[in-house]
Amino acid sequence: MAYDLDLADRLRDLLVDHGEVTERKMFGGLAFLVRGHMVAVARGKGGLMVRADPAAAADVVASGRALYPEMGNRTMRGWLCVDSSAVKTAAQLQSWVDPALAYAATLPPKP
């Protein structure tokens, strides 16, 4: 399944003012990197994957609003998979992207 082109466009519009933004095809979707740090992915399986503070992500997963992605046999606790129904509106998408940007800003600069 190809990634959601509309979601990718909406992510692009949200991230354009956040510094150096690059796009890369990854994980069967389109990943968006801000200053070298991956922030969000329009997933090939549908929906959104966002970077998350691992401490805060546990509460989000426990609430049932998102799931941890699985890469092989590994659970990626610094990321969240969000169903496409939870990012239909601009406000919903922004509510996932803002914390992802905030957490990525705490990471050391990429060389």
Image: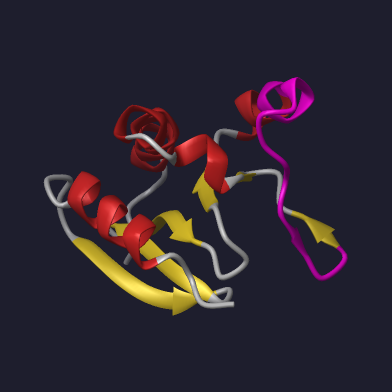
- Residue 12 appears in the rendering: yes
Instruction: Examine the image and state in which quarter residue 89 appears.
Output: top left
Between residues 16 and 45, which one lies in front from this camera angle?
45
Left or right of 70 on screen, residue 103: left
**Residue at horizontal 53 percent and vertical 36 percent from the top:** 86
**Residue at horizontal 37 percent and vertical 76 percent from the top:** 24
Quarter occupied by the C terminus = bottom left
Q: Residue 9 location in percent, x, y?
A: 26, 60
Q: Is residue 48 magenta?
A: no
Quarter occupied by the N terminus = bottom right
Left or right of 91 on screen, residue 87: right
Left or right of 46 on screen, residue 72: right
Q: Residue 67 location in percent, x, y?
A: 72, 41
Q: Residue furthest right?
A: 73
In this rendering, is residue 93 above or below 25?
above
In this rendering, is residue 87 above or below 37?
above
Instruction: Examine the image and state in which quarter residue 101 appears.
Output: top left
- Residue 110 appears in the rendering: no
**Residue at horizontal 70 percent and vertical 21 percent from the top:** 59
User: Where does the magenta region start and end?
Assistant: 59-73
Q: Residue 53 location in percent, x, y?
A: 56, 33
Colour setup of the view:
secondary structure
Between residues 90 and 57, which one lies in front from this camera angle?
90
Q: Is residue 61 magenta?
A: yes
Instruction: Examine the image and state in which quarter residue 110 appears.
Output: bottom left
In this rendering, is residue 37 above or below 26?
above
**Residue at horizontal 15 percent and vertical 52 percent from the top:** 16
In this rendering, is residue 9 above or below 98?
below
